[in-house]
Image: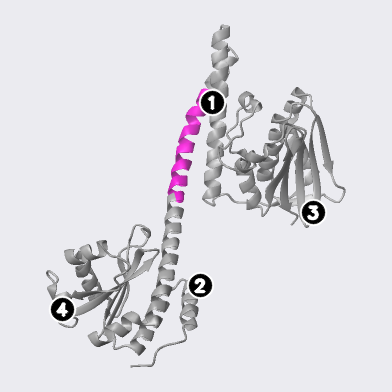
């Protein structure tokens, strides 16, 4: 037998290499060789264990000398009622369990008659099981070895990492399925909504006959509700594309002045209707930007629309400046402002801030969420400052190049 092993730092180095390379089998082979050097090891098997705390790990063989032979052993062990009961009642105080294979129902193997089962725990929950076959006289040394304890601790870290990885993979798959389903549903819903908008518009215009005041009121309500529903469907479709990473950028050289004026044309009527002052300020050194025109317009129109919506008197300003190789599109208003306790809600889906203005003007609650995601798609971001009762400033930051 080899002298006690002392270089435990090497075990962690090997573990980190396995984690970085996403190859846990390298670590399994390494610790198998290490244990074999120290003890008269005949069989060494590693399985993961699906417990309540680590449900993303399956009960499966992850390493063994002879995979086919060991898988047969593991299958029969896990099917044995005695072992099942033991695993169910497992406690951290019991460090190992002896298993006589010739006593298992419908299984007997001359090569291996007796295995020792060592559970690996993390936060009092079993995360893995190690099966070893060593001479009984070495069992006490093995069980009390600092080397074995360090190896088991590092295996626990590896399996925690695997559990997290599988959880993330499952979440990604679930999200993709959800987004695909949402995209299909959205496309199916848009057609009948468009029909409702068209028919209600004809009723509003009284093309097929005059309506009494009550009928006209209902026709207007149908038209406005259908338009709101269509906006919601389009926003949901945009979010589904962004979350599925299916939204692509089509970068082109854009004249900043033309871009701003084009966005202002969409809100010009609203500004006049509310009798607000408007200013467009573009610094002299800013001429062009490389960006996706449609997506940047979507962001700016949303920010400008919000500014007009929440400003009852005063002004709205679109100021374009540069800072640290970024272009800043700042939308500044003299509106109602945002309470500090509501700041965290701004970029959350459907988390609309409750004000008297919200009761007057409907919104999906998704505009800022989509705008921020589109900004990040460009490598930029949206920031804001606000004083209650004085106004807000929402800034779109985009890289110059």
**First in sequence: mark 3 vs mark 2:** 2
Which residue is label 2 attached to?
A: 20
User: What is the magenta range?
Assistant: 175-197
Residue visible at 46% across and 82% down in the picture: 8
Closer to us: 375 or 310: 310
When the figure is inspected, residue 107 is found, relative to residue 133, above or below; the finding is: above
Numbered disc in front, either 3 or 4: 4
Label disc, if present, on residue 128 of the rendered structure: none
Q: Mark 4 highlights which residue?
A: 109
Q: Is residue 334 left or right of residue 79?
A: right
Which is more N-terminal, label 4 or label 3? 4
Rounded to the nearest angstrom, the CA distance separating label 4 from label 2 is 39 Å
Q: Earlier in the sequence, mark 1 or mark 3?
A: 1
Q: Pick whichever of labels 2 and 1 is earlier in the sequence.
A: 2
The answer to which of 95 and 167 lies nearer the viewer is 95
Q: Are marks 1 and 3 in contact (CB under 8 Å)?
A: no
Give x and y (percent) for residue 179. Answer: 47, 46
Q: Is residue 189 magenta?
A: yes
Residue 181 is situated, as x and y percent measured from the top left of the image, at 43, 43
Q: Secondary structure at mark 3?
A: strand
Q: Kindly report the distance in space between the C-alpha atoms of the residues bearing marks 3 and 4.
A: 74 Å
Q: Residue at x 56, y 28 (%)?
A: 228
Mark 1 or mark 4: whose residue is earlier in sequence: 4
Q: Are marks 2 and 1 in contact (CB under 8 Å)?
A: no
Q: Earlier in the sequence, mark 4 or mark 2?
A: 2
Q: Are marks 1 and 4 in contact (CB under 8 Å)?
A: no
SS type, badge 4? loop
């Amino acid at each position: 037998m080899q002298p006690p092993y002392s270089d435990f730092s090497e075990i962690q180095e090997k573990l980190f290499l396995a984690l970085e390379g996403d190859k846990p089998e390298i670590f399994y082979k390494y610790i198998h060789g290490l244990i074999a050097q120290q003890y008269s090891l005949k069989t060494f098997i590693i399985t993961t264990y699906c417990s309540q705390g680590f449900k993303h790990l399956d009960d499966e063989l992850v390493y063994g000398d002879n995979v086919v032979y060991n898988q047969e052993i593991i299958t029969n062990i896990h099917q044995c009622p005695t072992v099942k009961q033991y695993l169910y009642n497992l406690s951290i105080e019991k460090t190992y369990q002896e298993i006589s294979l010739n006593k298992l129902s419908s299984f007997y193997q001359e090569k291996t008659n007796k295995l020792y089962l060592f559970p690996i725990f993390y936060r009092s929950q079993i995360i893995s099981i190690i099966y070893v076959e060593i001479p009984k006289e070495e069992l006490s040394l093995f069980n009390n070895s600092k080397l074995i304890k360090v190896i088991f601790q590092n295996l626990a870290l590896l399996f925690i990492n695997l559990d997290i990885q599988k959880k993330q993979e499952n979440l990604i798959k679930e999200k993709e399925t959800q987004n695909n389903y949402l995209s299909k549903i959205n496309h199916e819903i848009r057609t009948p909504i468009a029909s409702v908008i068209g028919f209600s518009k004809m009723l509003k215009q009284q093309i097929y006959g005059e309506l009494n005041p009550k009928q006209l009121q209902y026709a207007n309500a149908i038209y406005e509700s259908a338009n709101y529903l269509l906006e919601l469907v389009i926003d949901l479709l945009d979010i589904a594309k962004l979350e599925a990473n299916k939204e692509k950028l089509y970068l082109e050289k854009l004249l900043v002045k033309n871009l701003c004026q084009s966005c202002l044309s969409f809100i010009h009527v609203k500004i006049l209707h509310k009798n607000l002052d408007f200013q467009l300020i573009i610094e002299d050194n800013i001429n062009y930007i490389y960006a996706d025109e449609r997506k940047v317009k979507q962001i700016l129109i949303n920010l400008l629309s919000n500014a007009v919506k929440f400003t009852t008197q005063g002004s709205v300003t679109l100021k374009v400046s540069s800072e640290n190789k970024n272009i800043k599109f700042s939308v500044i208003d003299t509106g109602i402002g945002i309470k500090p306790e509501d700041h965290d809600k701004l970029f959350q889906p459907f988390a609309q801030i409750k004000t008297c203005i919200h009761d007057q003007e409907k919104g999906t609650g998704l505009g800022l969420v989509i705008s921020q995601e589109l900004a990040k798609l460009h490598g930029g971001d949206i920031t804001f400052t606000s004083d209650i009762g004085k106004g807000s400033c929402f800034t779109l930051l985009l890289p110059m190049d």
